[in-house]
Amino acid sequence: MTLVGVLRLRRHTLLHVAASTISGERAVPKLRVATLSTSSNSHLEDKKPILELLQRVADGKVSPQEAAELCGPAAEYEAVGDFAKIDTKREARTGFPEVVYAESKTSQQVAAIMKAMIDGGEDNVMASRVTPQAADQIRALMPGQHLTYYEMPRILASKTLESATKGDVEMDCPTACVLCAGTSDLPVAEEAAVTLELADYRVTRLYDVGVAGIHRLLRNQHILRASDVAICVAGMDGALPGVVGGLTSAPVIAVPTSVGYGAAFGGLAPLLTMLNACSPGVGVVNIDNGFGAAVLAARILQQLR
């Protein structure tokens, strides 16, 4: 493979920056020093760009001062205009890439950020909390990209669930079970489920199994017990996670939703119920935060892969 091919394959590694520096191009492009891999050679692969840069220093092609600059803050993020700094190393550090939170951003800002991430080689670029109108505007601003909009969870992604589930997810891989108490909780539950599926995790769903008809959950315990982590989404009284915590040995991630009548206080009532769950082993994320629950579940599942 040619040097250019290697640089493209490694997706803006330090070697690419070194080559640009030698040729007189002082602009520092976006970088990725390390990427996650499930192969046994992942650690060697992660170190390869640095080793190549050090070899160039040893060969006298790059000065130590230039190498130090290339390994400094400029390699830690990519600026997009004057409104965003993309964390290009987040997946390497945490196991989950940066996701664009679209709420309160303009469609132009979201499109610019997503385009920069896609151009940087990210294969799973997501924006959360995207309205249908904003999704249409963003796609119009990115005519050369195929973006899929998932209306229920309000996710706009460069990846389709069909491609995510074809070959990367094996039947014996760790599984997350996403439960929700009622149909009104589906947007938050689907935000968690789709986020995990786009990240190539296996997900099972148990929907509309709230405590008002507890037999619906009890009749499906086999699905719950076959999972390695449970995400439990509920509004109103928020009692479901406590029940689930008493039925499974897997960690339970509770997600309160803003669904409910006046005294639910926009999700505060289920939040407090979940924080006070009698069942041990229940952790709680913020109100309506299906995405945060998915990332926490992914970190748990990573340890089982």
Image (cartoon, grey):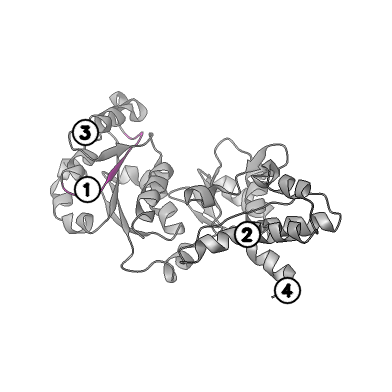
Describe the element under mark 1 as helix, strand or loop: loop
Task: Say what amino acid the circle numbered 1 marks.
Answer: Val
Task: Say what amino acid the circle numbered 2 marks.
Answer: Gly
Magenta stretch: give its range.
247-259
Question: Which of the marked residues, 4 or 3, is nearer the chain's N terminus?
Answer: 4
Find residue 121 and name its label: 2
**Real-space Cα separation, disc 1 to disc 3, in angstroms:** 18 Å
161 or 62: which is nearer to us? 62
Label 3 crowd bin: few (<14), some (14–19), many (20+), radius 10 Å:
many
Which residue position is annotated with label 3? 277
Label 1 crowd bin: few (<14), some (14–19), many (20+), radius 10 Å:
many
Which residue position is annotated with label 4? 2
| Position of residue 160 measured from the top left corner of the image (x, y, whole percent) | 50, 62
| Position of residue 105 measured from the top left corner of the image (x, y, whole percent) | 61, 38
In the drawing, does residue 109 fall left or right of residue 57? left
Which residue position is annotated with label 1? 209
Task: Say what amino acid the circle numbered 4 marks.
Answer: Thr
Describe the element under mark 2 as helix, strand or loop: loop
Residue shown at the point (53%, 44%) measured from the top left = 131
